[in-house]
Image (spheres, grey):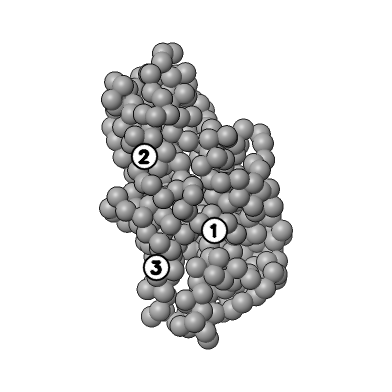
Amino acid sequence: MNIVTKPYANAFINFAKNKPEILCLSADLTSSCEVDQFRDQFPERFFSMGMTEQHTLSFCGGLAMEGFRPFFHTFSVFLYRRPYDQLINSIAYSNRKVRLMGFLPGITTPGGITHQAIEDIAVLRSVPNMTLLETGDATEVETVLEIADAIEGPVYVRVLRGLVPRLFETPFRFNQLRRLCQGEDVLVLSAGITTEEVMRASKALATAGVNITHLHASTLKPFAKQQFLDALTNIKHGIITIENHTVTGGLGSIVAEILAEEGIGKKLIRLGLQETFAHGASRPYLMKKYGLDAMALVSAIEKLLKKTTGITENDLQAVRLDEVHSVAKAEAL
């Protein structure tokens, strides 16, 4: 495993350079969303719209109506909170091919409530015609663009930026769950940055004699329902979801809805932000404080199994997948 610096920057240039109908838009966060190199190489296809997200979404709808394929880059929180009315009327209702590339999803920023998109999946999952994608590593960041561009209608993508670990060898696959390990004790579903934490915990859990099936979800709407149900067949103790989002409306709610609709009586524990806003701090601190890290998963598994595993923070640190997070990772605005 290695760490990739700014995977989106080169990926977007390589993806869009020979597609003149693709336009790049920014809301005064060009370098923060890693499209400054594209701006410099293709200035005629770059639009700096300033801090006018409402206007920009309407503009994107118009561009799409004229046959262009706009990719709008800004922080996740600015793509749906303030311009929600324009998102509905200019893009979703008319099913325009607009790609909303959202950076700093959830608690990946120390910016606090004004910059942390913690309910974006819940909001946008309820919008008709909207597709929701979430990247979990550098490989998915590099390969999500072709997937998003091929979808009819609007697409919202949670994008990781900066120093991003490469966890996967295979590219982003639309509406498929990645099976990262196989076991019969507990089924764990993760998305985004929480997948790395589950991968850390799974090694320690296996050493402690607990075998989990781990599924990584990168397509949140639609959702690979049958694949989830198939994975659940031989699970003994229950299901845990872990997500960089509130437990309401996101991955945990998706799973709960499927269980209810199918009449499946499996125990479900949802890890994520529990009816709270997050405050500003480093990503590792916030993940620990709000129960999104490997130790929180271990505790949830112990609750399901009704026994202790003996796993400690030191055990999890020993299987840490990278050494650059926290101090060396650029997480600021």
Instruction: Give how far across and how far down residue 91 sits, in percent.
Output: 61, 64
Label 1 Cα neighbours within 10 Å, binned few <14 / some 14-19 / many ≥20: many
Instruction: Give how far across and how far down residue 143 sits, in percent.
Output: 37, 61
* Residue at mark 1: 103
Identify the residue at horizontal 43%, vertical 19% (top origin): 302
Residue that extends furthest to the bottom in the rendered view of this protein:
44
> Which comes sooner in the sequence, label 3 or label 2?
3
* Residue at mark 3: 11
Identify the residue at horizontal 38%, vertical 23% (top origin): 311
Identify the residue at horizontal 65%, vertical 75% (top origin): 49
Q: Quadrant of the C terminus?
A: bottom right
Mark number displayed over residue 241: none
SS assignment at label 2: loop
The answer to whether residue 148 is visible is yes
Say which amino acid is labelled 1: Phe
Identify the residue at horizontal 64%, vertical 52% (top origin): 111
Q: Quadrant of residue 275?
A: top right
In the depicted structure, whether residue 160 falls above or below residue 41? above
Q: CA distance from mark 1 to mark 2?
A: 25 Å
Q: CA distance from mark 1 to mark 3?
A: 15 Å
Label 2 Cα neighbours within 10 Å, binned few <14 / some 14-19 / many ≥20: some
Say which amino acid is labelled 3: Ala
* Residue at mark 2: 320
In the displayed structure, does residue 236 sit left or right of residue 284? left
Instruction: Give how far across and how far down residue 182 sits, in percent.
Output: 28, 32
Q: Quadrant of residue 25?
A: bottom right
In the displayed structure, does residue 82 sit left or right of residue 9? right
Residue that extends furthest to the top in the rendered view of this protein:
306
Q: CA distance from mark 3 to mark 2?
A: 27 Å
Say which amino acid is labelled 2: Arg
